[in-house]
């Protein structure tokens, strides 16, 4: 799995997960998320190209969302594939972190929450 | 009905090998719909990852055996390891979480498996943990 990121002109951190999440990715994912969300109050995690998600990755997503929320911000998940959405629902994570269909929806959600 | 078997020493890297093998087994059955195949792969990944990370033997890495039985209507999975006794059925289910702030970080792997597999059972046979899943 690879991770890409960018900061938009509106100051939103977009973190994109690409490929298949594997057990050996998890420490790196945790470290990367910690660095990327530092100081950020609007975070979008783009799942549109993530093929496989499992519980330890969900742990990092929940922990990151909690960190962002603690500083008054919002993190959302964007455009999960059908297979990833099944896992998000089965884990209960879909009830904890908003899931947005596309970038426009995600931007509105994170910016509204931080306004 | 087709039966596939794989045996590896439990490790972080062997999880990937098992998933690759399980995907290849599923590809032999193009009539299977994607939902049960995905459920099977996720369940195997969760349970074998747990073994790789937490299962221990005093004389080295535990052995993991995975058997997949595929017929027209269902997938049966048997995952065995010879680490210390561990019954995932006894792991307390995560209680309903009212919000993100109070959410648990861990314990979701078994919850995912319970949700995706229609039936799940555990038995300890000699020195082996055995988890059986039925995925329709």
Image (tube, coloured by chain):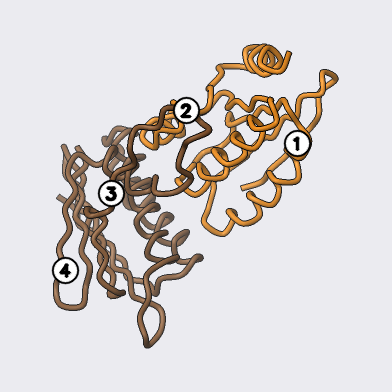
Chain colours: A orange, B brown
Quadrant into which the C terminus of chain A falls: top right
Mark 1 vs 2: CB contact within 8 A: no
Q: Position of residue A14 (x, y in %)?
A: 72, 30
Q: Nearer the viewer, mark 4 or mark 3?
A: 3
Q: Is residue B110 left or right of residue B52?
A: left
Residue at 56% x, 18% y: name it. A100
Q: Nearer the viewer, residue B134 or B93?
A: B93
Q: Which residue is mark 4?
A: B124
Q: Given the image, what chain letter belongs to the residue carrying mark 1?
A: A
Other-residue count near label 2 (Cα within 10 Å), few / some / many at <14 / 14–19 / ≥20: few
Residue at 28% x, 43% y: name it. B29
Other-residue count near label 4 (Cα within 10 Å), few / some / many at <14 / 14–19 / ≥20: some
Q: Which residue is mark 2?
A: B99
In which quadrant of the rendered view does residue B32 lie?
A: top left
Q: Position of residue A22 (x, y in %)?
A: 53, 53
The reply to whether label 1 and label 3 mark residues of one chain is: no
């Amino acid at each position: 799995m690879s991770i890409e990121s960018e900061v938009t002109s509106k100051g939103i951190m977009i973190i994109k997960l690409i490929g298949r999440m594997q057990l050996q990715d998890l420490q790196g994912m945790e470290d990367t998320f910690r660095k990327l969300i530092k100081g950020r109050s609007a975070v979008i995690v783009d799942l549109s190209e993530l093929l496989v998600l499992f519980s330890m990755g969900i742990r990092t997503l929940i922990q990151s969302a909690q960190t962002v929320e603690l500083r008054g911000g919002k993190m959302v998940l964007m455009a999960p594939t059908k297979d990833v959405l099944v896992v998000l629902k089965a884990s209960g994570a879909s009830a904890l972190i908003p899931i947005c269909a596309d970038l426009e929806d995600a931007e509105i959600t994170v910016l509204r929450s931080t306004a | 009905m087709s039966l596939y078997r794989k045996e590896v020493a439990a490790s972080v890297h062997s999880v990937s090998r098992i998933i690759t093998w399980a995907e290849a087994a599923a590809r032999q059955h193009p009539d299977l719909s994607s939902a049960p195949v995905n459920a099977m792969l996720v369940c195997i990944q969760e349970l074998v990852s747990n073994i790789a990370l937490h299962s221990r033997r005093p004389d080295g890495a535990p052995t993991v055996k995975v058997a997949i039985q595929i017929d027209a209507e269902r997938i049966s999975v048997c995952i065995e390891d010879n680490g210390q006794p561990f019954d995932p059925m006894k792991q307390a289910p995560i209680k309903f979480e009212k919000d993100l702030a109070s959410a648990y970080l861990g314990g979701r792997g078994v919850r995912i498996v319970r949700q995706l597999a229609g039936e799940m059972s555990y038995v300890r046979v000699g020195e082996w943990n055995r988890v059986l899943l039925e995925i329709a």
